[in-house]
Image (tube, rainbow, N blue to C red):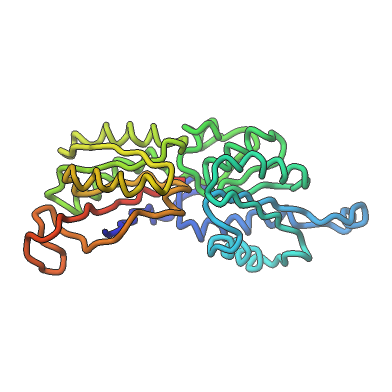
Amino acid sequence: MQILLVCNRRGAPLSRRPHFLLVLVALAACLGPFWLVSISDAQQSISPRRIGVLLVIFSPESREAQAFRQGLRDAGYTEGRDGVIEWRSANGDYSRAPELVADLIKRKVDVIVVESTIAAQAVKHATSTIPVVMAVVADPVGSGLAASLAHPGGNVTGLSAMTTDLTARRLQLLKEVMPRLTKVAVLSNPDAPYSPRVIEELKAAAPTLSLELSFEAARMPTQLAPAFSAFTRAHTQAVYVIADAFSFRHGTPGSARPRDPQGSDRTGGSPGGTRPSPRVLLGHTR
């Protein structure tokens, strides 16, 4: 089974979506002023500036977190000397986000960085005064995090993954990669707040591409294998995964050599043999 990553790589303004690692480096530079302590400030307080980082998908040891640290170093700031980073990770468990936010607020952080919609919503519901910086979320307007991209309002700012803008385009790219494609399965986590909107966008785009969609949901690892078995029995040729913390942590079950819709594999094998596994398109959303 092949994972096809379709991303927007075009350079764009702040509200649009570059590579996640670059986002963290840019955010580190933007957050630098929170670490600056003037001489008068230092005389009045011995407490260092604190940056709270709430992770739902990743861990503090992940390469994304290391990129954040590197971005601060590149901007001339030293962790521990110029400020303190308070790391909190839910390890993919959505239900833990509120308690982790409460702990960060208790620690009196100056700003909170989040890497997912769930984390951003948890912070927004808990505080209207602490600045919140989103490192790429799926749909900040549709998720109630911002009034608009141009004028977000409130205490939340950051980057949008342009999910609703790119959903139809991703499906179109999949059709271009597989011209004979007619059946696409959609896998989603019903707990992801943006999944319903992405599903509606896919339903709207499918007829124009002559695609038939089927849907399965999975919120636990044990539900992945049955979902993909159902896709195979239905002879779907590709799977569109609405990515979230769950799919990023657990991936997709198994792997197989990709085959075209008529049964020949991409390396020149002949038709026949085992039933081909559908290709997987991982729609980048958080």
How many labels, in total? 0
Residue 271 left/right relative to 98: left
Q: Quadrant of residue 184?
A: top left
In the rendered image, the vertical position of residue 171 relative to residue 261, given as above or below: above
In the rendered view of the protein, which quadrant contains the N terminus?
bottom left
Image location of residue 191, percent across then percent down: 46, 36
Q: Please determine whether, in this image, residue 61 is positioned above or below residue 234.
A: below
In the figure, is residue 47 to the left or right of 201?
Answer: right
At horizontal 70% and vertical 47% (from top left) the residue drawn is 111
Q: Nearer the viewer, residue 106 or 99?
A: 99
Q: Residue 258 location in percent, x, y?
A: 21, 60
Residue visible at 74% across and 42% down? 105
**Going by the image, does 52 lie left or right of 22?**
right
Relative image position of residue 202 (x, y in whole percent): 29, 36
Instruction: Give the residue displayed 69% in from the left and 35% down from the top.
Output: 127
User: Which residue is at a point 17% across and 56% down the rendered structure image?
Assistant: 276
Front position in the image: 175 or 159: 175
Residue 221 x/y as whole percent: 41, 49
